[in-house]
Amino acid sequence: MNWCGVYVMLSAVISLLSNTNWSAASQSVKCHKVSAQTSKSCIVVKSSGIHQMQGFNGWANWETWNVTLWIGNDEGLYNLACDVARDGGTYGHMVSIIHDAGSKETPDGCKWDDVKIDGIEVNNMMKELID
């Protein structure tokens, strides 16, 4: 049988929806393997290292994910991040500019200067925008 290799990690989705971290996910990952040639499917239980991952959608936490989401998807914030990065600035510099413009938080309610934000991750993301 030819499998297409599409996996939906059920425990990961449940973990994200409940806003918990990956370490709280089950020790075994339940994957739904979908066949490319048939509508039948099976549940494959694998023991993998996914339970050791932590964070939110690949970022350090929700706060880091949220600010990078807005920077990456809002044209004005994206352009500002590119300008700041091109000038050798950091996320901290960008936050100062955003605050000067009167914005204290993302539309989702995350403060731009929340102490939980991983500034190194955001700085790296900003550098990648101009590379």
Image: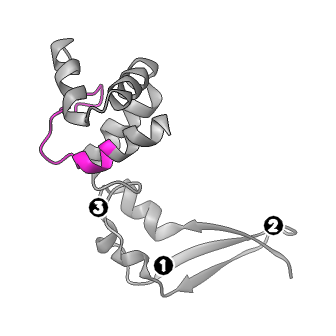
Q: Sequence order check: which comes first, mark 1 or mark 3? A: 3
Quick check: can you spot residue 105?
no
Q: Provide the secondary structure element on which disc 1 rests.
A: strand
Q: Provide the secondary structure element on which disc 2 rests.
A: loop
Q: Quadrant of residue 22?
A: bottom left
Dot 1 corresponds to which residue? 29
Q: Is 8 inside the magenta-drawn segment?
A: no
Q: Amino acid at mark 3?
A: Thr
* In-image side of 77 versus 90 (left or right): right
Q: Amino acid at mark 1?
A: Val
Crowding near the residue tagged with mark 3, few <14, some 14–19, many ≥20 C-alpha atoms within 10 Å: some
Between 23 and 53, the one lying in front of the other is: 53
Dot 2 corresponds to which residue? 39
Q: Sequence order check: which comes first, mark 2 or mark 3? A: 3
Q: Residue furthest left?
A: 115
Q: Amino acid at mark 2?
A: Ser
Q: Sequence order check: which comes first, mark 2 or mark 1? A: 1
Q: Position of residue 85 (x, y in %)?
A: 35, 32
Give the residue at x 43% y 75%: 50
